[in-house]
Amino acid sequence: MIACDVLARHHRQRGEDVFFLTGTDEHGEPVADAAKAQGLEPKELADRNAERFKALMPRLEASNDFFIRTSDEQHMRRVQEVLQKVHDNGYTHLGLYEGWYCPRCADFKVENEIGPDNTCPIHEIPLVREQEENWFFQLSAFQERLEQLYASQPDFVQPETRRNEALSFIKSGLQDVSLSRAKLTWGVKVPWDPSHVFYVWFDALLNYYTALGYARDGEDLTDRFWPANYHVIGKDILKFHTVFWPAMLMAADLPLPEHVFVHGFLLGGDGRKMSKSLGNVLDPFEAMDEFGVDALRHYLSRDVQFGADGSVSMESLGARYDGELANELGNLASRSIAMLRRYRDGNVPDGALDLEDEFAGLADDVATRLSGADLTGALDAIWQRVRRMNRYVEEQAPWTLAKDEANAADLDRVLRTLAEGVRTLAVLLWPWIPASSEKLLTALDRVDVSYAKAKFGCDAPESVQELEPLFPKQR
């Protein structure tokens, strides 16, 4: 969620038309089983949990344009329309399926996806032998087209390790897959055979497309925003999103998203999968309560290379908070503004700037990296300048220059450089730490975060106001 929000905010800064979608996938056997265990109807459980996820969005400062629920009537109607087209195009057939099934994944496993002793390698639970009559999607018909897609668009799936994993699955030989389930009722009914519901993955995958049809009352946004530039998923559902999904879109004569980015897992501080029983969980609410939302957003983008697995903990969050946010960025901002207020009554001097070469090309570099979903690399490029600015303060020692009126011109140049450097960093960092950036820009009397203002030297502040610590030191 945070990563997608960083991308959405950055592209809005660039003046681009952005639609940022998230939501909840609510159908299928895992939800039905969980509801039954709690004595609830599936819709009751889905309603309760969807509200929890919705409430998390503003807490994370997420700027999503819509929150879809796959139990929405409008979504279900559009699913039926698209999959009817797949059926009419001749890519479905009725057949008997027998195989090993994971009720937690809602996935029939092929041979190379089965763990030791017939277990699910993801959930580590025994697989169930299932046999039922299903409608099948003719995935095998798209073997050649998918191989061509991967050859002609090497960056269709990112990062490359995930592309290779998906391509390996395709080249191992595609088999037709279940499109419907006859034993379930919690799902979208198959329009040409109402005794079946669609297999949850085909219903869920289509949300990226269906939401555009009803996210705005009385307006269809499909032509405006489809195909998506980036479709962001977790690595454990790679097969569905990088193989089944493009094939289904091809079968329905719909354009494919430009890129599918596959992110890794956040692991406990001990490098193992998070587990309450192991006590290695990073609770996002606890993290936000102790360090603030912006600190969590910064930490996750900074500590874990986006696309890879990475260990996270409250201890390492605290270290990143103190070491970078408080000591580096926060201290730079506080002392720059404090010196301007002390030595120039809050007025930013006119004149020349230092460090122009140090900032040259930074905005373009960050934009290029974020266009390729390199959140970690882009943030690192910005942070190198945060550190360069701190070194500049030590090199120039404005507190020493201020002792001799003969150094007034040099002090003016240094203070102007600090004001403009801090402003530029605040604009560049806005996608990651929006509240803190806006607080800093307000103190600099510059609130414009458009990307045209991300170039050093283009909008030097004229005056500064008092700034409360952006990142107060933790106890």
Image (cartoon, rainbow, N blue to C red):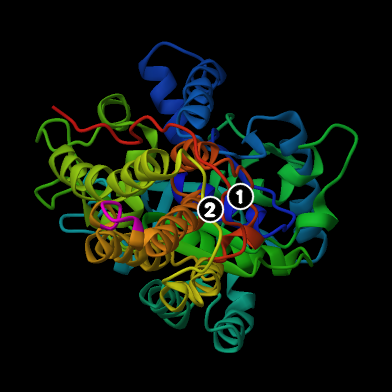
Instruction: Residue 186 in the image: state x and y as whole percent.
Output: 57, 29
Image position, residue 228 (x, y; %): 67, 60
Residue depicted at 49% across the width and 64% down the height: 261
Q: Say whether residue 394 is left or right of residue 206.
A: left
Under mark 2, the amino acid is Val
Q: Is residue 80 magenta?
A: no
Task: Give me the disc on residue 427.
Answer: 2
Residue 152 lies left or right of residue 467; in this view the side is: right
Q: 161 or 11, which lies in front?
A: 11
Q: Is residue 48 visible?
A: yes
Three-letter amino acid code at the position of disc 1: Val
* Residue at position x 73%, y 67% in the image: 251
Q: Which of the two labelled residues, at mark 2 and mark 1, occupies the earlier sequence position?
A: 2
Looking at the image, residue 40 lies above or below residue 451: above
Task: Determine the residue positioned at 77% across, 66% down.
Answer: 90
Mark 1, residue position? 449
Task: Please state the extent of the stretch shown in magenta in the rendering.
Answer: 401-405
- Residue positioned 11% across, 33% down in the render: 279
Give neighbour class at mark 2: few <14, some 14-19, many 20+ (Cα, 10 Å).
many
Q: Quadrant of the C terminus?
A: top left
26 relative position to 17: left or right: left
Count the labels in the image.
2
As measured in the structure, the alpha-carbon distance from the residue carrying label 2 to the one carrying label 1 is: 5 Å
Determine crowd level at label 1: few under 14, some 14-19, many 20+ residues with C-alpha closer than 10 A: many
CB contact under 8 Å: marks 2 and 1 = yes
Q: Is residue 403 magenta?
A: yes
Q: Secondary structure at mark 2?
A: helix
